[in-house]
Image (tube, coloured by chain):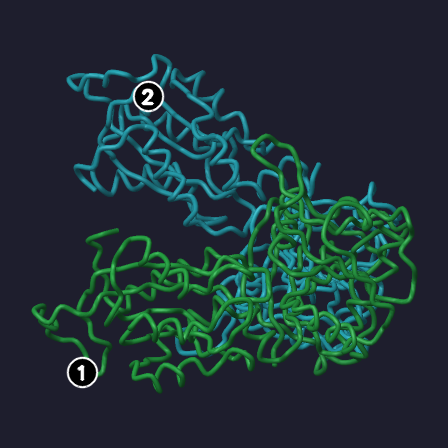
Chain colours: A cyan, B green
Amino acid sequence: MGPQQLTIDAAMTRALQLAARGPAYGPNPRVGCVLLAPADDTVPVSEGAAPDALDPRPRTVLAEGYHQGAGTPHAEAAALADARDRGVGVRGATAVVTLEPCAHTGRTGPCADALVAAGVAQVVHAVDDPNPLARGGAAVLRAAGVRVVRGLRAAEGAALLHVWLTAVRRGTPYVTLKTATTLDGFVAAEDGTSRWITGSEARAHAHRVRAAVDAIAVGTGTVRADDPALTARVTGHDGVERLAEHQPLRVVVGHGGIPPRSRLRGDGGPLLHLPTHDVAEVLRALAAREVRHVLVEGGPTLATALLAAGAVDELHAYVAPALLGAGRRAVGDLGVRTMADVRRFRTVEVRRVGDDVLMVSRSVR
Amino acid sequence: MGPQQLTIDAAMTRALQLAARGPAYGPNPRVGCVLLAPADDTVPVSEGAAPDALDPRPRTVLAEGYHQGAGTPHAEAAALADARDRGVGVRGATAVVTLEPCAHTGRTGPCADALVAAGVAQVVHAVDDPNPLARGGAAVLRAAGVRVVRGLRAAEGAALLHVWLTAVRRGTPYVTLKTATTLDGFVAAEDGTSRWITGSEARAHAHRVRAAVDAIAVGTGTVRADDPALTARVTGHDGVERLAEHQPLRVVVGHGGIPPRSRLRGDGGPLLHLPTHDVAEVLRALAAREVRHVLVEGGPTLATALLAAGAVDELHAYVAPALLGAGRRAVGDLGVRTMADVRRFRTVEVRRVGDDVLMVSRSVR
């Protein structure tokens, strides 16, 4: 990396790429950081640069880092450590970071203080920290005489952190509802059989989603009917299916019991039984466990309760090119009687997975 | 075009492109034809050509043509006319054509005879003609001493003619069932309102499909409930909606009447009322009118009858990112009680149209 030169804007692109390497699950956001040397004043500002643009001169990349999950260093600390490992000084440097540096001592010390102590002269960040416990880093930096520029590539930064930002701003987990239906909206035939409505590629995709969330929730009816394991499984190049490295919390909602021989009690994430039908209570219980993203996989009672409460942020609808004509539905009565009251979502992605389609959409607020 | 040189293989690519310019509707197939000069023996066959490959030498393009719909010249006749217009001779030429030349006097004379009379020495075609009335052209040509090579790019030729070939081989129209539903499979809310489940881009796409079929069919229940016009409408660059050039036959199936003030009686294609619930009778009646492709737009009674009879060749499922929880369904009871009996289709296209998705799938025979 020694001689690499990047503008501040290009360094933010790099920081966003680094951030995306971090885990999507966990209580902390994905953040990337690039440390740039002070600008070389012998390099003229290129003509045609907008007068209010960030200084467009390329600068030498000193170090970089990203957050690899709770309990590991924050991105800024990782970048400062990278600089120490390389034996490069960072006095007068610019830190380009995807999220406002924290001002909070949690599992690690505050990043704002670490940047000040290292002698960083300028911090450019994309997204302001909404976390009531951690925010205020920009003020700390400014008070220490560090120049702070906020909002560079803010939309891209916010898109990367959409789930985390939504959960942290609101104080309750981001709720993704997954369905796997026929084209006529059934999750199972009349006799309850449902294997398999969607194909193996769609099911493999759904397991990759499981491995990226903090929790999976189902109702007790689904536990009794389907005996799901609620594990994230991946198939290796050897064709053997095994548990993914990260296993989400397994959450069962409802007053029913969990049978002693349930697959939920086998290998996988921790098991949490919430004997309630109160949606707000469920979300509070998950928030208290630092769950930022919960994937709801049914059944209809739980899905309908969440939809009726307006608590579903995102739909993952896997749709198979098949018709049943009759059977069990993914969603029950929502109290909608006329088109004016339809629950509409906004499409963010349409993806063909094998013979099925995955339609990802988000609630319209 | 004068100096253009193409190999026989490249000429077939060109012929397929020409064929696709013809109308998708109408009783006749879309066919393209390129006439190539005799090979120049001074040009050596390139090394490395497979010994059984078609002569890989490039030849001068003499003329080309395609079929523009019933009542206009067939592709071969159009290409011969093009040669006459250009004043070029075609004696000893190779005709590269996407479908076997016909041996049938219909609205125009047999193409096989026309090619023989013109002195064409070789005919290379992609797809054999399955039409019992028109086939046999290859035999006519061979009997007259013309070399015939069949099956070049046969899969591409068959893909272009999929709908027509299916209809002609079977003797009944190709049936496409269109649905426009929420993610939970409803075509209307409980009170019957359905405007609009899908967005304007999906509806515009559906009108382009209407303009490419021979007939649109609905049941009498839909006529009474929705009063559809069943016209193909297009919106011009001026933003004004008008009738498309081609208007499909409007078919109403069932014993109910068509109200005198129905929009079906307004501008648009001819109106055909088939007072029956017998699927085979409907298909025979349409075949007798040379309908190759019928688009069924509902309602549930007609859709269910066709699906139950195994008469649906293709599904066009427009799915909106919306949930109703209750309402009217696209398809009624198909007699399926367990997953083993699910009606499964094979996906051929997934396309995002605005905020909706169109899933095109075909029946698994």
Residue B243 in sight here: yes
- Residue at screen point 76% across, 80% down: B338
Work out how far the residue at label 2 is from the one at label 1, CA to CA, in angstroms: 73 Å
* Kind of residue sitting beneath label 2: Ala
How crowded is the residue under tag 2: few (<14 C-alpha within 10 Å), some, or many (20+)?
many
- Residue at screen point 65% across, 69% down: B290
As helix, strand or loop, the secondary structure at mark 2 comes to: loop
As helix, strand or loop, the secondary structure at mark 1 comes to: loop
Q: Please state the chain letter of the residue tagged with numbered disc 1 in the rendered image.
A: B
Residue A310 in sight here: no
Percent x, y for residue B236?
Answer: 59, 36
- The C terminus of chain B - image quarter: bottom right
Q: Which numbered disc, 2 or 1, marks the residue closer to the eye?
A: 1
Percent x, y for residue A25?
Answer: 54, 52
Q: Please state the chain letter of the residue tagged with numbered disc 2 in the rendered image.
A: A
Q: Is residue B80 toward the left or the right of residue A157 in the image?
A: left
Q: Is residue B231 toward the left or the right of residue A348 in the image?
A: right
Q: Let me know if marks 2 and 1 both belong to one chain.
A: no
Reading the image, the residue beneath label 1 is: B51
Give the camera-side residue of B180 and B324: B180
Reading the image, the residue beneath label 2 is: A121
Give the camera-side residue of A288 and A157: A157
* Kind of residue sitting beneath label 1: Pro
Image quadrant assignment for residue B270: bottom right
Percent x, y for residue B110?
Answer: 46, 73
Against B52, residue B203 (above or below) is: above
Give the camera-side residue of B194 and B136: B136
How crowded is the residue under tag 1: few (<14 C-alpha within 10 Å), some, or many (20+)?
few
